[in-house]
Amino acid sequence: MNYLTALHRTKEVVLSVSPNGASYDVDWARTNLLAGVTEARVITPDGRELPLAGRPDTIWTLMNLLASHGLSNPSPVLDLRKHRMGEVAGVVLDACV
């Protein structure tokens, strides 16, 4: 039923594609973020929380940014205090403003 809720709220889904492009799976966790079914948040390096509810364009931007840097964040919370997020923290914050 969770899938139906997501599809009623968005026409877009997030796909995970195999390296050879021969197969794909719907990434329902990320689709739920995009659809607003699950509330996405960013935690800034100084600990502030930035809610992304109702901002699917920003969420898409962040997903693409992370993917382009080979980073994955399966959680609805993107914590920029983590060491591995250091190189993208500035760009993420720019996208969230």
Image: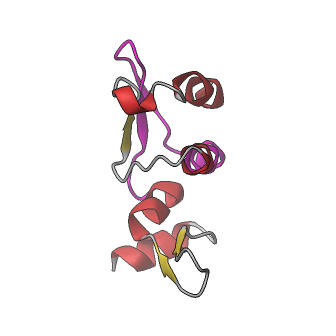
Q: In this picture, is 97 found above or below 14?
A: above
60 is within the stretch colored magenta: yes
Q: Is residue 53 left or right of residue 94?
A: left
Q: Position of residue 81 (x, y in %)?
A: 35, 23
Residues rendered magenta in the picture: 37-63
Q: Is residue 57 left or right of residue 29?
A: right
Q: Position of residue 69 (x, y in %)?
A: 57, 43
Q: Which residue is most to the front?
A: 20
Q: Quadrant of residue 29?
A: bottom left
Q: Position of residue 34 (x, y in %)?
A: 53, 57
**Figure colour scheme:** secondary structure
Q: Which residue is most to the top?
A: 46
Q: In this picture, is 17 found above or below 96?
A: below
Q: In this picture, is 90 found above or below 79?
A: above
Tally the numbered discs. Answer: 0
Q: Residue at x 47, y 70 (%)?
A: 6
Give 39 or 8, whichever is nearer the viewer.
39
Q: Residue at x 33, y 49 (%)?
A: 75
41 is within the stretch colored magenta: yes
Name the quarter where the C terminus is drawn.
Answer: top right
Q: In this picture, is 36 found above or below 71?
A: below
Q: Position of residue 79 (x, y in %)?
A: 36, 31
Give 21 or 65, whichever is nearer the viewer.
21
Give 68 or 49, whichever is nearer the viewer.
68
Name the quarter where the N terminus is drawn.
Answer: bottom left
Q: Residue at x 36, y 26 (%)?
A: 83
Q: Residue at x 59, y 87 (%)?
A: 22
